[in-house]
Image (spheres, grey):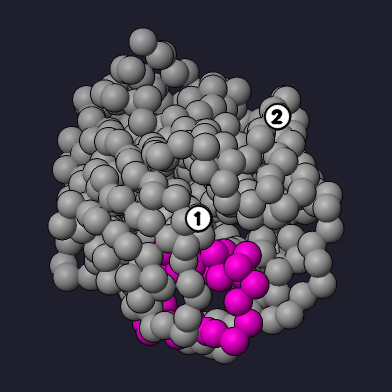
Amino acid sequence: MLVTVYPAKLKGVQMAPASKSSMQRACAAALLHVGETVIHNPGHSNDDLAALDVIQKLGAEVAMNASAITIHSKGIMPIGPEMNCGESGLGIRMFTPIAALSAQSIRIQGKGSLVKRPMHFFDEILPQLKVSIQSQAGYLPIQIQGPLKPSTISVDGSLSSQFLTGLLMAYAASGAQEVSIHVKDLKSKPYIDLTLHVLNTFGWKVVHQNYQQFQFLHHTPLPEHIEYTVEGDWSGAAFLLVAGATSGPILVTGLQMDSTQADKQVMEALRKSNASIHISPEGILIGPAKDHKGLQSFEFDATDCPDLFPPLVALAANCQGVTLIKGVSRLAHKESNRGLTLQTEFAKMGVKIDLEEDVMKVVGGAEIQSSIVFSQHDHRIAMACAVATLNSNGPVQIIDAEAINKSYTDFFEHLQHLGAQVHIE
C-alpha cells in the first residue's frame, strides 16, 4: 500500500484506539479462565486478531460482535498440533509458556519480522520447567511439549518482559504457590504492571518485591463469568498526541490517566517540549506551544518505553534544538532495527539523527522535506513518518504503509477525520 500524506493543520476530536497490550493480555487471561469472559472495547489490529486465533487453537471458543467478544474456555486444550502468532512479539513470548501447560506437542510459528527475532530465552528457561523444546538455534519455528511444571527460577529481565508476562500467567493459572520467579535487571516494568493488573482483575493474586521476586498467593475461585474492558492505547495515541502538539490543537479521548501502560510517559516528553496540554474529564486537549518559544528540544529516557522512539522522533523533528532520547539498545530487535530505520527514513525528510551508544540525538528545527520513505515493514515507522509530514514543505509518500495494520488499523482514517489530506493507493 502506497500512502501519500500532505501538510495539514488538524482540529477536532479523536478517540484513541484500543490497547493491543491490554487486549492480548485479556485474551490470554480469558483462555486460562475456566468459564465465560466478555471483553469490551476489543481491538482489531493484526496482533489482536493473531491473539484471538491463538487462543482458539489452544481450545477457546470465540464469538465476536462490533462492541464485545465473548470467550468460553475450559483451559488449555489444543485443537491441533500448531499455532501461529503472526508478527506479534508479545504473542509469541506470552503464549509459548501458556501453551506449554498442555502435555500435547505444539509447533509454534510466526511470520514476517518475527522469524528473525531471537527467542533463545525459551531454550534457556523452558527445560528448567520440564518442557522439552526444539528451536532453530534460538529462532522460530519451535516445537514444545509440556506440561510445564512451575518451580522457583531466575530470569534475566533485560531480555524480555514479554516472556516474563507469559511465565507469570502460566504460573498463576497452574495454581503455583510454593514457588517464585526471581528477576534480574527487569526492563519495561510498566508492562509487567499491566500484566499484574490483568491477572489481579481476573482474580489471580500475584505480588512482587521491588520487581525482583514474584510470588503467587492463594485466591478464591475465579467467578464463572468475568467482564473486562480494554483501555485506550497510549502507544497508538502517542502518534495522535504528537500530531496535536505539532499541527493541532486536537482533543484525544479514551485514555486512562492512571493507566499502567508504559507509553503513558509520552505525556512527560510532551510537557518537556513545551506543548500546550489541558487534561479534563473529556480527554486531553493538546496543541502547539502557546508562547513565543515554540516547541523546544528535550531529554527523555525511553529505556522502559522503547515503543515511544518513533513518535518522539516526529516530535523532536519539530522542536528547536537537539533532543536526546536514551534507550537505543532496546530498539535492535523490534519489527525493524528501529534506531537505524529512524535514522535512515527521517534523513530522507531532512532530519539529522545521530546514534551514540545508548543515546539518540535528533536535530530539530530544519524544514521537513517532501520525500519518499519506506516503512521497513514497521508499523511505528510508517506512523512516525506520517505525523512528521504534517509540518513538512510538501507531500511525503510512504511505501508499504499497510504495516500500520499490525497495531493501529484505522490510523490513516483517524488522521483524515482530524483534517489531514491522506491519499491511499
Residue drawn at (56%, 37%), measured in percent from left and top?
56
Amino acid type for the residue under numbered disc 1:
Ser
Q: What element carries label 1?
A: loop
Residue occupying image coordinates x 66% and y 33%? 62
Residue 62 visible to an observer of this rendering: yes
Q: In which quarter of the image is residue 178?
A: bottom right
Q: Which residue, given by chain and number where applicable, does mark 1 sit on? A: 102
Marks 2 and 1: in contact by CB < 8 Å? no
The spot of residue 398 in percent (x, y) is: 29, 25
Left or right? Give the position of 55 relative to 144: right
Name the residue beneath numbered marker 2.
63
**Left or right of 169: which side holds 36?**
right
Residue that appears at 28% across and 71% down = 124
Query: 185 or 385: nearer the eye?
Result: 185
x, y (%) of residue 254?
71, 44
Q: Which of marks 2 and 1 precedes in the sequence? A: 2
Q: Is residue 165 magenta?
A: yes
Q: How crowded is mark 1: few (under 14 residues within 10 Å), some or many (20 or more)?
A: many
Does residue 362 sit above or below 51 in this rendering? Answer: below
Label 2 neighbour load within 10 Å: few <14, some 14-19, many 20+ = few
Q: Can residue 265 be seen in this view?
A: no
The front one of 381 and 294 is: 381
x and y percentages locating residue 346 in the rendered image: 23, 41
Please identify the quadrant where the N terminus is shown: top left
- Residues drawn in magenta: 161-189
Left or right of 113 in this view: 301? right
Kind of residue at disc 2:
Ala
Could you say whether the residue bearing mark 2 is in a helix, strand or loop?
strand
Task: Classify residue 373 by image quadrant.
Answer: top left
> Nearest the camera: 195 or 96?
96
